[in-house]
Amino acid sequence: MTMQSNIADNLQKIQQQLGKTQLIAVSKTHPVSTLEEAYEAGCRVFGENKVQEMVQKYEALPKDIQWHLIGHLQTNKVKYIAPFVHLIHSVDSLKLLQEINKQGLKNQRVINCLLQIHIAQEETKFGFSFEEAEALLSPTLPTDLPAVKIVGCMGMATNTNDAAQVRQEFAALRHFFLEQKARLGATFSELSMGMSQDYAIAIAEGSTMVRIGSAIFGVRS
Ligand SMILES: *Cc1c(COP(=O)(O)O)cnc(C)c1O
């Protein structure tokens, strides 16, 4: 079997399980030629975790692709993606949000963002606590930061085979998401959760976006 048919087959299998959930094809570390194969198979939404890599791929690939930044973002790198990024999933500080606003103003566009919430029982992952995120999501935030639009939240479950734990973590994030949506209104509409290992659980727990890499492209070297 060729690489090409693998990617197309994998995409098709995943798409059958999605329902209304949107697929972000996480193409980090893979070369442009691999993304082209996914593009040929119909993929128009890609997720990257490194700024420089995303910029290079944006420049090399067709302009009808939506680019999602899913990894930790340093404030000094926001300027490189501000002209074209579709959604930043990984906002984890007010300082970063302020810089995204500044770069949005410079580029005369409103940049869509998700607040990354720390839901895993792991020390290493970035993100706000529920309390911190709720405090940040004040009703005056859209006025204070007019070039930023916070459209929801993102979370990563603990990397474990314990499906019950993963489900509990996703359920907690969904609960938070629905509470904030009720408070803030319908623009708070996206719940980004689920990766190759746990996307079925995430979809069952109400995810609106799954970020899937290895289940489409194979293991990263
Ligand atoms: C790499 C990555 C993914 C995709 O991981 P897979 O296990 O390959 O599906 C999803 N979300 C984030 C934040 C990532 O860094």
Image (cartoon, rainbow, N blue to C red):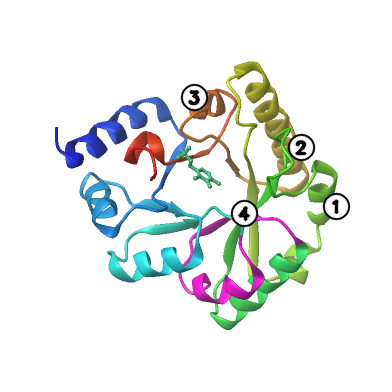
Q: Disc 1, disc 4: CB below 8 Å?
A: no
Dot 2 falls on a residue whose secondary structure is helix
Q: How much space separates mark 4 and mark 2, taking CA atoms? A: 20 Å
Note whether ligand 1 is within 8 Å of mark 3: no
Around disc 4, counting alpha carbons within 10 Å, would you say few (fewer than 14), some (14 to 19), or many (20 or more)?
many
Magenta stretch, residue numbers: 73-93
First in sequence, mark 1 or 2: give its number.
Answer: 1
Residue plotted at (49% across, 24% down): 200
Query: To which residue does mark 3 refer?
Result: 200
Q: How much space separates mark 1 and mark 2, taking CA atoms? A: 13 Å
First in sequence, mark 3 or 1: give its number.
Answer: 1
Instruction: Please tell me in which quadrant of the rendered image residue 75 appears.
Output: bottom right
Say which of marks 1 and 2 sits in front. Answer: 1
Residue plotted at (36% across, 30% down): 14
Say which of marks 3 and 1 sits in front. Answer: 3
Residue nearest the viewer, comparing 3 with 20: 3
Dot 1 falls on a residue whose secondary structure is helix
Query: To which residue does mark 1 refer?
Result: 135
Query: To which residue does mark 4 refer?
Result: 90
Q: Is residue 76 magenta?
A: yes
Residue nearest the viewer, comparing 182 with 141: 141
Note whether ligand 1 is within 8 Å of mark 4: yes
Q: Which mark is residue 105?
A: none
